Amino acid sequence: MVISPGEYAALSAVDIARHVARGDLKAVDVTSAALARIAERDDDLRAFTEIWAEQALARAADVDAQVTRGARLPLAGVPIGVKAGEGAGSYQNTRLVAAGCVPVGATSVPRNNRGWQTYGHTDRGPTLNPLNPAWSPGGSSAGAATAVAAGLVPLASGSDGAGSVRIPAAWCGIVGLKPTNGRLPARDRAGLNSPGVLVRSPRDARAYLDVFDGPPTIAPRSAHPLTATWSATLGYADTDPEVAAVARSAAERLETAGLITWAEGADLTLVDPAPVWTALRAGSSLSTELSSITTTNEERLRDCCERADLIITPTTPHPPHGHGGPGHRMSVALTWSFNISGHPAISLPAGTTSRGEPVGLQLVARHHAEPQLLAVADRAIRPELR
């Protein structure tokens, strides 16, 4: 069955894998549709720095041959974007290819040595946000988020050292998952930079994680809601009031839907981790003062997680900035605490500000509690709850 670029763009990764496994679609036809969709849209969006058309079609043909021989590939024929600088040979991308994925190109990242740059660079200009070309798509997984949000690929690999999966997910209105630190090999010596994924559905995030863990990663649906605590600032972030209000409304919809209940005595106030993150990323030994910050935050997080299954915050403290950069604002203020602590975290679409700017809702779970995190995310993102 031939599939058009528009039909392809509407399919999730799980949908594609199911159709290819059943023989309803050929991986070659899906890949051809993906390449056509990229050709139609990416001159304007600039999500990709390289397109690997010949290699992708050859890989898709191999997937079709494996399926014909009876191989069971959990992500058979799923086109994926690969974060530039990571490459198709990285641990996570090698595993995704072994599961049946078809890398179609490298997605953009910021230039090196440009400070707190949260937008993507290509030789054709900056990567644009599909929701509004005046906005940055976030970073550093900028092209990955744009490619997924625009339907160029249903799944793109990313990495998250301070929020680099969750921030672009929030600003492009999609889903971004950072697993527990160490669940996949870190991409830096400090152990801060975790591989992660950008998708349009939590079910696709589940399928991604299943590649590494084996099914099931979704916990059985509990008759009881998860306990949760809310923080707009984590005690230190300069969060815009409207961003906080949009995210809080999304959190309250989870409560109304019976997915969460607010935990008693689980308030969370952390110390600003900026100097700790900077020292760790530089490979420096922590001073007595920085060690004290780390210990304090670890104790407060441990106490909070004993009382609550989830910590809920806005994903970013402010809406998407323009292509000139973030200025003095710290886009990572609400995300990088959990790169230091290692907790798994996911960003879901929360809604928009009065100016139409996207806001993300960040859900953080206990270490290795991705099953709970993905279970509530899967139910939370249903259209009737948005």
Image: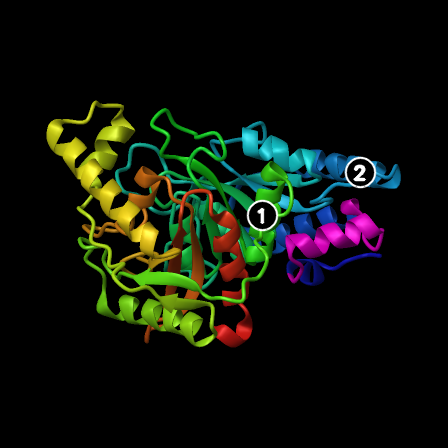
- Going 14% across and 27% down the picture, which residue do you hit? 287
Q: What's the mark number on residue 313?
A: none
| Camera-side mark, 2 or 1 | 1
Where residue 237 sits: x, y (%)? 20, 54
242 versus 122 height, above or below? below
Say if residue 152 shows up in the picture.
Answer: no
Name the residue nearer the viewer: 82 or 334.
334
- Quadrant in the rendering for residue 63: top right
Where residue 240 sits: x, y (%)? 23, 64
The dominant secondary structure in magenta is helix
The local crowd at label 1, few if under 14, some if 14 to 19, many if 20 or more residues have their Cα within 10 Å, is many
| Residue 3 located within the stretch drawn in magenta | no
* Residue stretch in magenta: 10-28
As shown in the figure, which amino acid type bears the numbered disc 1?
A: Thr
| Disc 2 secondary structure class | helix
| Residue 11 located within the stretch drawn in magenta | yes
The tag earlier along the polypeptide, 2 or 1, is 2
Q: Name the residue under label 2.
A: 61
Q: Which colour scheme is used?
A: rainbow
Say if residue 311 shows up in the picture.
Answer: yes
Q: Residue furthest right?
A: 69
Alpha carbons under labels 2 and 1: distance apart: 29 Å
Q: What's the mark number on residue 217?
A: 1
Horizontally, residue 167 falls left or right of residue 330, namely: right
- Going 42% across and 67% down the picture, which residue do you hit? 260
Where residue 36 sits: x, y (%)? 68, 52
As shown in the figure, which amino acid type bears the numbered disc 2?
A: Ala
Where residue 109 sits: x, y (%)? 42, 40
